[in-house]
Amino acid sequence: MTAIIERGAATAPVAQSEPPRRRPGFFGSSNGQKAVMAVTGAVLVLFLAGHMVGNLKTFAGAEAFNGYAAWLREVGYPLLPKRGLLTLVEVVLLAAIVLHIWSAVALARRARAARPVKYAARRKSQAGGYVVHVMRWGGLTVALFVAYHLLDLTFGVANPAGGAASPYQRMVEGFAPGRWYVTVFYAVAVVMVGLHLRHGLWSAFQTLGLARGRRGLQGAAGLLSAVLVLGFLSVPFAIMIGAVK
């Protein structure tokens, strides 16, 4: 009897253990992707703030604005070639945009994988729907606008004054009263950026554990977004109504 049991036990199939799963690296983890989003978001916010301050020089007149544009192209010269530092900033900015989008998509996929069953429509909050629409359509609107903005004011291809005109002249001609539709498009894109920024700042506060019980931080996120939006919109609307010529 004992021999039969032992023989049967010997012939029983042995369960094979699954190979250990590879742990994702830092950038493959949720914390790593959140860190990428936070760092790239900070880079983009700093760029927006600097860009807004530069745009406001339009109110100081053609000489001040053209001088600012020339300084951007020559800063660091002769240690760096002309437009060298500006080109480096543009490369960093492009990399920040690409990495910011990548981290946002990666985190969204991770969230869907962790919650495979969709919520019922009646349980979807209005805030959640608002965020989805802002991020989805806002991102598309901003991407289209950035492409047009470069063709219009940077390269002058889509600007009535042409690429040979001064930066101030391109700015004024680009938002002339007869081109009100460009100003409207600009306003929609800037508002979308503001909504995205407000949500992004508040999410960053929550991720860092600073948002609990601190309504002032939510107000600070909204205030910063509002300042940037109003700062960017002040120039094109002033040109459109003829306050800046």
Image (spheres, rainbow, N blue to C red):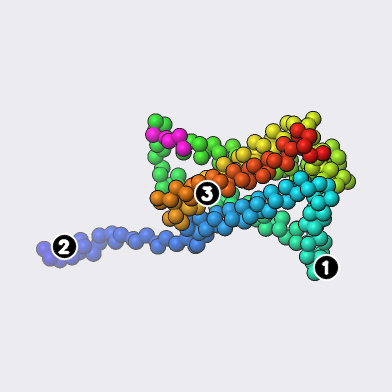
Q: Based on the displayed image, in which of its 4 quarters is residue 2 positioned?
A: bottom left
Residue drawn at (84%, 50%) of the image: 63
Q: Secondary structure at mark 2?
A: helix
Q: Nearer the observer, disc 1 or disc 2? A: 1
Residue 78's disc is 1
Callout 3 amino acid: Ala
Residue 5's disc is 2
Residue 226 falls within the magenta-colored stretch: no
Residue drawn at (54%, 36%) of the image: 133
User: Distance from label 1 to label 2 (Cα)?
Assistant: 89 Å
Query: Which of the pair 21/96 is nearer the observer?
Result: 96
Q: Earlier in the sequence, mark 2 or mark 3?
A: 2
Indicate the position of residue 114 as horizontal and vertical percent values. 41, 47
Callout 2 amino acid: Ile
The mark total stands at: 3
**What residue is disc 3 on?**
220
Quick check: marks 2 and 3 in contact, CB under 8 Å? no
Q: Earlier in the sequence, mark 1 or mark 2?
A: 2
Residue 75 as seen in the image, left or right of residue 32: right
> Which stretch appears magenta?
123-127
